[in-house]
């Protein structure tokens, strides 16, 4: 009887242990860290780690592509735009002045992108200084770029429609003043909200400027929606002007060349910055409040690969602008050729080669006998 009772109790213990193990497996997602069953690793931990590794590899691959191909173009190209245009100040036009300031803003963002390239898991957003630094430079560049593109579209409409006495309004003095005001507006649109937000969150240790929803709404509306509404209105008016100029074919072609580069820059800006603004807008529309007690406040932690991709897309805009400016800007190509000739003495080399060839192969107007004698 004792053996039977011991056997029965052992069976009961094994059965109850199996039930408790099953219950632990069923309620895995409902257990906290203090539950005894939490010591048993869930089945999906290995799957989560493999997924994180896969996302890390994809982010690293995209970062390598950006560093190898786009970053040199953006860094060297924007420097060339600044150096070449400054070297030919006397030939600088009003659109060139705007593109110089746009290149300066792009150069700042390209330099800042080196930090984001290595931010594969979005951990930099946990560091208050780096998060604030990246957010400030990103927003200043974004505001300055979109403000310059908006003003350039308005300037093109003034130049084409010849309204408000554009010959008196569109001067280099007014263009320099406009550039200064645009920079002041870009810095103010970033620093004023930044100062106000930090005064409200001075006691919080884990705080990032980019995580405040009011700042995110301001970035989407002031930095994307409103400017593109103005740009769309300007280009619709410009199209009407071009349609009215159909009788003057030469005038229409010249105006179309002037608009082609600005339209390409605006289109590339829209394509590159649209994912960033959609990503932020989706987060804002979900209405999820970050946990105050946790240091992992950034919403980018939930989607690290998506956040990394949209940031690289935004940085790519500053790298593509020099290509657009060099390929579509005939004036810049001429300046660049003259600049290279001056720095490398290509013209002197061409004259030397031409003189050497002329000594061997004289001009065709000389007699045939002279040709043969000189050739010998």
Image (cartoon, rainbow, N blue to C red):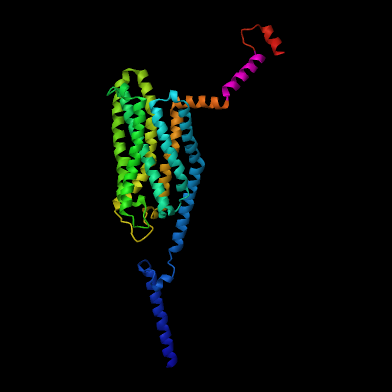
Question: Where residue 335 sits in the image (x, y, percent)?
Answer: 48, 25
Residue at the image position 48 percent from the left and 46 percent from the top: 63
The stretch in magenta equals 345-361
Quadrant hosting residue 289: bottom left
Question: Where residue 77 sits in the image (x, y, percent)?
Answer: 48, 34
Figure check: 16 above or below 292: below
Figure check: 280 above or below 227: below
Residue at the image position 41 percent from the left and 31 percent from the top: 99
Is residue 281 visible to us here? no
Quadrant hosting residue 273: top left
Figure check: 356 above or below 223: above
* Front residue (pair 206, 51): 206
Quadrant containing the C terminus is: top right
Question: Where residue 178 sits in the image (x, y, percent)?
Answer: 34, 31
Figure check: 40 above or below 276: below
Quadrant hosting residue 247: top left
The kind of secondary structure the magenta stretch mainly shows is helix
Question: Where residue 132 sits in the image (x, y, percent)?
Answer: 39, 49
Residue at the image position 43 percent from the left and 40 percent from the top: 108
Q: Residue furthest right?
A: 376
* Front residue (pair 135, 192): 192
* Front residue (pair 149, 240): 149
């Amino acid at each position: 009887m004792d053996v039977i009772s011991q056997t029965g109790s052992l069976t009961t213990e094994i059965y109850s242990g199996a039930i408790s193990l099953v219950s632990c497996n069923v309620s895995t997602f409902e257990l906290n860290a203090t539950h005894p069953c939490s010591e048993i690793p869930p089945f999906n931990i290995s799957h989560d780690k493999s997924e994180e590794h896969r996302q890390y590899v994809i982010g690293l691959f995209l970062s390598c592509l950006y560093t190898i191909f786009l970053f040199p173009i953006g860094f060297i190209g924007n420097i060339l735009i600044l150096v070449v245009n400054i070297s030919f100040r006397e030939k600088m036009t009003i659109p060139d002045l705007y593109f110089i300031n746009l290149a300066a803003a792009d150069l700042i963002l390209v330099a800042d992108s080196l930090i984001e390239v290595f931010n594969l898991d979005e951990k930099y957003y946990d560091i208050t200084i780096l998060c604030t630094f990246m957010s400030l430079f990103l927003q200043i560049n974004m505001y300055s770029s979109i403000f310059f593109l908006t003003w350039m579209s308005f300037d093109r409409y003034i130049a084409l429609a010849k309204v408000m006495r554009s010959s008196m309004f569109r001067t280099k003095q007014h263009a320099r003043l406009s550039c200064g005001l645009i920079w002041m507006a870009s810095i103010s649109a970033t620093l004023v909200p930044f100062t106000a937000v930090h005064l409200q969150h001075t006691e919080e240790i884990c705080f990032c400027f980019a995580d405040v929803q009011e700042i995110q709404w301001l970035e989407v509306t002031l930095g994307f929606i409103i400017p593109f509404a103005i740009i769309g209105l300007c280009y619709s008016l410009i199209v009407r002007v071009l349609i009215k100029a159909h009788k003057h074919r030469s005038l229409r072609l010249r105006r179309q060349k002037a608009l082609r580069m600005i339209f390409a820059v605006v289109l590339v800006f829209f394509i590159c910055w649209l994912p960033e603004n959609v990503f932020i807008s989706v987060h804002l529309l979900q209405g999820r409040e970050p946990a105050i007690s946790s240091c992992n406040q950034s919403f980018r932690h939930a989607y690290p690969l998506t956040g990394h991709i949209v940031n690289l897309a935004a940085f790519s805009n500053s790298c593509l602008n020099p290509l657009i400016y060099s390929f579509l800007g005939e004036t810049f190509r001429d300046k660049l050729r003259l600049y290279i000739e001056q720095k490398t003495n290509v013209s002197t080399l061409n004259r030397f080669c031409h003189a050497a060839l002329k000594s061997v192969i004289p001009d065709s107007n000389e007699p045939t006998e002279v040709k043969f004698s000189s050739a010998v």
